[in-house]
Image (cartoon, rainbow, N blue to C red):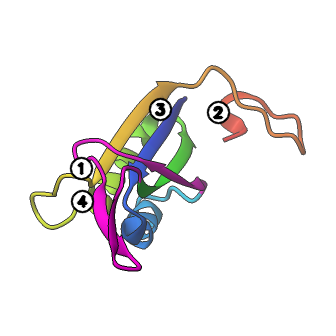
Amino acid sequence: MKLIIAIIQPHRLEAVKTALTEVEVFRLTVMDCQGFGRQKGHAEVYRGHEFSVNLVRKVQLQIAVNDEFVEPTIDAIMKGGRSGDKGEIGDGKIFVLPLDDCLRIRTGERGSEAI
């Protein structure tokens, strides 16, 4: 089992959800988050004064999958999250972490059956 954490641009969320549905991944958690990488924020004007915004709004997805779904899930996130054919700086990151155990609270199932 793996936990896939993806940080993507908010406007790409619907495209990523559609791509995940196509590979039969239906369970995910979505959180709003902020951060910066190579983008290093941007400048905005408010009431005539320019100021720097160091944190850029992003969306974080957390998806627990069984091993056979890892690559299809990664491919779907790449397909839905990439801007254009080659992508752009700020499209996001995907992290794949080992998942030791999973428990379904309602039934008490453990491991891959609980996902």
Q: Position of residue 105 (x, y in %)?
A: 87, 40
Find residue 96 and report its image quarter.
Answer: top left
Residue at left offset 61%, top offset 55% = 27
Going by the numbered disc 2, the residue's amino acid type is Ser
Which mark identifies residue 67? 3
Going by the numbered disc 4, the residue's amino acid type is Arg
Quadrant location of the N terminus in the rendered image: top right
**Which of pointers 2 and 3 lies earlier in the amino acid sequence?**
3
Above/below status of 44 relative to 63: below
Going by the numbered disc 1, the residue's amino acid type is Gln
Q: Position of residue 36 (x, y in %)?
A: 35, 45
Residue 37 forms part of the magenta stretch: yes
Q: Position of residue 98 (x, y in %)?
A: 51, 22
109 horizontally vs 10: left or right: right
Q: Secondary structure at mark 1?
A: loop
Residue 20 forms part of the magenta stretch: no
**Which of pointers 2 and 4 lies earlier in the amino acid sequence?**
4
**Which of pointers 4 and 1 lies earlier in the amino acid sequence?**
1
Q: Position of residue 9 (x, y in %)?
A: 37, 61
| Mark 2–mark 3 distance (CA, rounded to whole Å) | 9 Å
| Mark 1–mark 3 distance (CA, rounded to whole Å) | 33 Å
From the image, tell me which residue sits under label 4: 82
Choose mark 4 or mark 1, whichever is in front: 1
Residue at left offset 26%, top offset 53% = 90
Count numbered badges in the picture: 4
From the image, tell me which residue sits under label 1: 39
From the image, tell me which residue sits under label 2: 112
Query: Magenta residues, as a range?
Result: 27-55
21 horizontally vs 56: left or right: right
Going by the numbered disc 3, the residue's amino acid type is Asp
